[in-house]
Image (cartoon, rainbow, N blue to C red):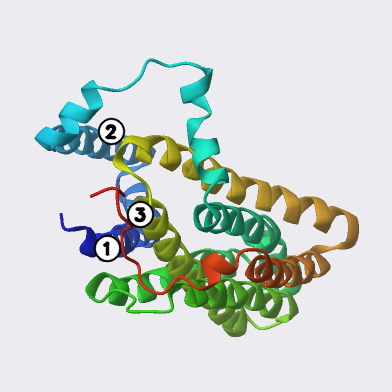
């Protein structure tokens, strides 16, 4: 695949993922109501087997196979090589750490059951609606990004997306309307999707092929843990001061992280186009 198409491919992958997030629970509920719980698990087994077969049919390019065969043996040096590589490159370090701390502070999904029951007084139907809202927003923005890449000012757009992410968390925290909460969470999901597409494109396009696996492993570790840590943060703060202050603190914290990172990582702020650097992965 030409490297210039990578941002669009990442957006297409995000579209497929968000479609699954929206449609999966609905299909599961329909199968459960029609055929029972056993049928749901049986369908899951079939789908996982089908996915395994399909991924086994993916062929690795010859040059990638050659480079894979030349990998160094595992040692402490190779184990922490990804961390060292990222630490020496402000654009990668800024992009990965920005996502970690923004999601750590701005995450509100753990608060949705409390909001649905105690703040919005909507019950289970409101919780289901709110839970799907971020995926709806992410899907709505990921589809256009899959058809047309971000042409310029990628760094500033990513920072703006993080700022909108924090502002949407703040609006959700203040909302007492199901409709407004749904819209705020949709914007929350859409802005997060924009940030994800830009960040993943920067990480993959600015990393040499021989370091790409290690760098992506570090990136996955931070992105995979930030959501869980963010939910823990939201729940812990809610237990101390309440759900609404927790959401407001998180939104304000995400905006503060955006402003601090804009000052601390000017190289990231000034990234224009999502283009590969010399020697980066092709």
Q: Residue at x 28, y 47 (%)?
A: 281
Q: Which residue is mark 3?
A: 24
Q: CA distance from mark 2 to mark 3?
A: 14 Å
Q: Which residue is mark 1?
A: 12
Residue 101, percent from left and from top: 66, 56
Q: Earlier in the sequence, mark 2 or mark 3?
A: 3
* Badge 2: residue crowd in 10 Å (few <14, some 14–19, many ≥20): few
Residue 52, percent from left and from top: 21, 33
In the displayed structure, would residue 198 be above or below residue 36? below
Q: Earlier in the sequence, mark 3 or mark 1?
A: 1
Q: CA distance from mark 2 to mark 1?
A: 25 Å
CB atoms of marks 3 and 1 within 8 Å:
no
One can see residue 60 in this view: no
Q: CA distance from mark 3 to mark 1?
A: 18 Å
Callout 2 secondary element: helix
Q: Earlier in the sequence, mark 2 or mark 1?
A: 1
Is 33 placed left or right of 4 in the picture? right
One can see residue 97 in this view: yes
In the displayed structure, would residue 216 be above or below residue 143? above
Q: Residue at x 53, y 29 (%)?
A: 80
Q: Residue at x 74, y 52 (%)?
A: 233
Residue 74, percent from left and from top: 42, 16
Q: Quadrant of residue 160?
A: bottom right
Q: For the N terminus, which image quadrant?
A: bottom left
On residue 120, which mark appears? none
Callout 3 secondary element: helix
Is 192 placed left or right of 266 in the picture? left
Q: Furthest residue to the right?
A: 240
């Amino acid at each position: 695949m030409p490297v210039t198409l990578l941002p669009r491919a990442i957006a297409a992958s995000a579209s497929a993922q968000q479609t699954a997030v929206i449609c999966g629970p609905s299909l599961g509920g329909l199968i459960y109501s029609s055929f029972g719980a056993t049928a749901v698990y049986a369908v899951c087994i079939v789908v996982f087997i089908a996915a395994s077969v399909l991924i086994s049919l993916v062929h690795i390019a010859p040059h990638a196979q050659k480079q894979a065969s030349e990998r160094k043996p595992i040692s402490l040096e190779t184990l922490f090589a990804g961390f060292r590589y990222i630490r020496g490159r402000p654009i990668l370090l800024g992009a990965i750490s920005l996502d970690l701390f923004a999601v750590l502070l701005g995450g509100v999904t753990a608060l949705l059951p409390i909001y649905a029951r105690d703040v919005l007084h909507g019950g289970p139907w409101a919780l289901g609606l709110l839970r799907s809202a971020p995926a709806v927003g992410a899907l709505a923005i990921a589809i256009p990004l899959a058809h047309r890449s971000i042409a310029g000012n990628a760094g500033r757009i990513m920072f703006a997306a993080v700022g909108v992410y924090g502002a949407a968390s703040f609006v959700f925290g203040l909302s007492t309307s199901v409709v407004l909460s749904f819209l705020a969470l949709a914007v929350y999901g859409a802005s997060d999707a924009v940030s994800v597409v830009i960040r993943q494109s920067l990480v993959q396009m600015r990393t040499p092929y021989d370091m790409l696996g290690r760098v992506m492993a570090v990136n996955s570790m931070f992105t995979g843990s930030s959501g869980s840590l963010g939910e823990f943060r939201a729940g812990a703060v809610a237990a101390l001061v309440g759900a609404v202050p927790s959401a407001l603190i998180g939104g304000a914290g995400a905006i503060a992280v955006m402003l601090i990172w804009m000052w601390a990582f000017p190289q990231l702020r000034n990234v224009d186009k999502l283009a590969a650097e010399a020697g980066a992965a092709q």
